Amino acid sequence: MRSNTEMSSRLRYLQNNDRVAIIGGGPAGSFFAIHLLREARRLNRHLDVLIIEKRSPANLGFDDFQCNGCNFCAGLLSPRLNEILDECGLVLPEEVIQARIEYVWIHGQWKNLRLRVPNDKQMYSVFRGTLPGRRTDLSAGFDGFLLGEAVKEGARIQYGKVQSIAYSTSGMPELTLKALSGEMIRLDASFVGIATGINAHCGLDYDTNGLIASVKRLNPSFVPGKTRKALIFELDVGEEFLDRNMNREIHFIEYGSKHLALEHTALIPKGRFLTVALIGKFIDEAVLPQDTRKIIHDFLTLPQIDSILPGVAAAPLACTCAPRMTVAPATFPFGDRFAIIGDAVGSRLNKDGLYSAHVTASRLAQAVLHEGIDKQSLARGYGKTIRWLVVDNRFGRIVYTVSRVAFSLPTLSRIVYQAFATEYKMRDEPSRPLSVVLWKIASGTADYREVFREMCGYDVLRSVLAGAAITFRNVAFEMFLGVQWGEYGRYPTVVLKEKREALKEQLASDLGMELDKSPDFERMYWIKIRGSEEEIMEELAKFGQPNARFLKLRIVDMQQIQGTPNQVGSVIRYRVPYVRLHAELLLTHRVRFQTLHYKADEGLVDHGKLIFNIAPTTDGNRRLSIYASFDYKKGKGFASRMMWRGARFLFPEFMHDVVWNHALCTIKEDVERKHDRS
């Protein structure tokens, strides 16, 4: 008969040749198997690792471990998770990667922000399972790839559904398993990792699941995590459509409408498909799936969505699901010889659930091999991970509350945009604190505690206060100038500080002339437009015309007084009637449907230039750039110097930002409306 010490040792540590059963072959289960087997080999210990997967195999080939169905996930791999995959030597096959993301858009009520994925980071979109059914590459799923890697490490797979877990008379966990054939099987294990996710039955609370109910019996202190509803659907929009409208981009939209209360929306391209994930009060209160089609239609016809993806409401619906997502981690999700990992234990709020799955899986693997498999050892080792999730989500709720308020209220949204734009325009890339915080929130690439600390830091607050001051100043001048914004059509126009010299060189090359190195005044703006060179040039021909919607200012009259629009010799006159000031712009160069160069007369400024340039973008659209520069009149005598200083005071430099920002957004909106109708 074994002594109590021997029995305690047997309970506390995994022994050579012990069996570890993992319930669920998703990312958490596969990550757990990979880390467990690798660490066991390092410790010269052999383990029999058995992954039990309830979904039937897709029968796509001997080496393919893809399972039928879907994992109810948006399918975005964050830069942080990609770094972990690299560290683990897990190289994603090309067919698994559906899109390489280069830009992340955040849409607020006032304006939209575009964040570039850093050059040393990787962000991908992937499919998780075999859905949608319209796909032809059913084997190219992230879950199938990870499951295959677990098998390469030595794990075995058994297909079937675990009905319950209980302790046998020997104190070992015993699983009741229903095989695909319908046969009921009892299976003993020395340790059980539960990686079932929270959507055993899509949309239903997982604490009603029979397996979870049996876990409660093993550990009465266990309390499942809190969840809320989400709505995920995929549209078959075609590769050409996505290349034109969302080339290597993902979009996060932080507001809905008065009738569609949404908190967060993700638009993620995947080959020819678009994945849309929605969360918000409206989804929480909806009766799903009965209301699904109406919600999808109402969402796709929102003005902000039609602006990004014109005509997308007509795209075929490929698949839809209404899963639940974790918003608060479980309490005491472990006991003697078992522990829960992945979504079933908890996930970081709203972001990067796959990273959370890896964290819980890898840390449990370390805990069971180095700390032990009894409840006390798991509380000491794996419990740290649960506490990390609890704290991270606590800060996450604060971060998302602040972010939602900032982007859903027009005035605050405008302040955030102005702070962001000012950083991009005035600061070097390493010195943009607000941009860094926004990137971390959007990409999920940092813990929420870190994000919150940086949000409250002096540098970010200074940027926001500067943005607020500039915003109120600009609003005052918009009222003074009579600038009217529509409900939509506000887009970023700022040129990054590090891009200015390259833009100047391009303009000089197109025109075959040198641009002044250091003029007194120099401003650059650009905007991407969905349209052709001809369509943009047609809109620019309205410069100085009565039918132009852009550059319609209360105190400045702009009128073409000579020549033909967009043709060399055309003259645009600026006239300020109240102070009897006027200046003229003469179109001196035109390069096809590409560049217009206006030269200012010497009445108000010296060496004045206004250049419009249209260049193709990588996604088949066009970028309209504006370059304005001149030297101020100095005057020779005291009286003339005072006069020109007064003129400079009456028309401060930032007024150009106000005017051209509005003009570019208006041009974009008018061109795209015509383009989308044609």
Image (spheres, helix red, strand yellow):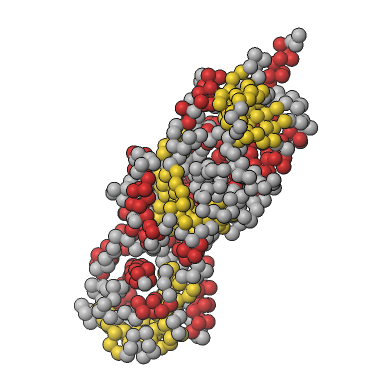
Residue 184, image x, y percentages? 60, 25
Image coordinates for residue 622, horizontal then vertical, percent: 45, 72
309 left or right of 173? left
Instruction: Tell me residue 131's x, y (percent).
Output: 52, 48
The vertical placement of 219 against 549, above or below, is: above
Residue farthest along the top direction in this orientation = 1
485 over 235 or under it: above or below: below
Residue at 44 percent of width and 33 percent of height: 204
Residue lying at 42% horizontally and 49% vertically, measured from the top left = 265
Left/right placement of residue 509 relative to residue 375 reads left
Q: Is residue 376 visible?
A: no
Which residue is nearer to you in this view: 467 or 312? 312
Decide: is 502 above or below 340. Answer: below
Could you tell me how many numbered marks the image carries?
0
Task: Locate the N terminus by quadrant.
Answer: top right
What residue appears at the point 63 percent right and 25 percent down from the top-left corner? 185
Q: Is residue 45 visible?
A: yes
Residue at 72% x, 30% y: name it: 48
The quadrant the C terminus occupies is: bottom left
Q: Quadrant of residue 118?
A: bottom right
Toward the left, the furthest residue is 578
Is 160 displayed left or right of 662 in the figure? right
Q: Which is more toward the observer, 590 or 412?
A: 590
Residue 393, percent across and down?
47, 37
| Between 423 and 444, the one nearer to me in the picture | 444
